[in-house]
Image: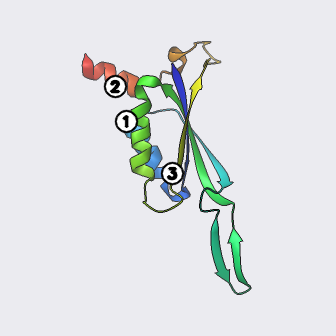
């Protein structure tokens, strides 16, 4: 089965997360600029005009679709790379994916998800 991982992370951690995912062989991903807030409800800023609340903070959303067998490795890579220990480090959401179809080749499922040098190919080589 395939899973979709959506990670909401700090803007300054995006390169660390991309590098960590590439290091384990995650080749395909999408990145979006998003705004929002979590438990902390935003941040309070002090300026010349006084104190004001900013509750829609800039974040980055990283989306990955991968097989069940690679899920924990991807989650671990994101957790390590995105961690600062401060409020606002982000969240990871995992959802099932019913189908994936590569438009160019019409491959479906796991075959549509394969890339040369990706995590699955690396696992085959290391076992072989």
Q: Given the current orientation, which residue lies at the most extreme bottom position?
A: 48
Disc with the residue nearer the chain's start (2 vs 3): 3
Across and down, in percent, residue 15 comes to 47, 51
Q: Residue at x 50, y 27 (%)?
A: 66
In the drawing, does residue 72 fall left or right of residue 89? left
Among the two numbered marks 1 and 3 on one chain, the one whose residue lies closer to the N terminus = 3
In this figure, which residue is indicated by the disc labeled 3? Answer: 14
Kindly check if marks 1 and 2 are in contact, taking CB atoms under 8 A apart as contact.
no
Crowding near pointer 1: few (<14 within 10 Å), some, many (20+)?
Answer: some
Q: Does 118 appear above or below 22?
A: above
Which residue is drawn at the image coordinates 52% and 22% (left, top)? Answer: 2
* Front in this rendered view, residue 69 or 18: 69
Is 94 left or right of 46, judged from the image as shown? left
* Helix, strand or loop at mark 1: helix
Q: How far across and how far down the image is residue 56, in percent? A: 69, 60
Residue denoted by label 2: 122
> Circle 1 is placed at which residue position?
24
């Amino acid at each position: 089965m395939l899973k979709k991982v959506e990670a909401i992370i700090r803007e300054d951690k995006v390169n660390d997360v991309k590098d960590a995912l590439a290091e384990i062989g995650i080749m395909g991903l999408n990145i979006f600029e998003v705004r929002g807030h979590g438990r902390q409800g935003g941040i309070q800023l002090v300026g010349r005009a006084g104190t004001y609340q900013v509750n829609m903070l800039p974040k980055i959303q990283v989306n990955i679709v991968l097989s069940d067998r690679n899920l924990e490795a991807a989650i671990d890579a994101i957790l390590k790379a995105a961690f600062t220990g401060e409020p606002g480090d982000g969240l990871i959401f995992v959802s099932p994916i019913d189908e994936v179809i590569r438009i160019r080749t019409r491959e479906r499922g796991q075959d549509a998800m394969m890339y040369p040098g990706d995590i699955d190919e690396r696992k085959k080589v290391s076992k072989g």
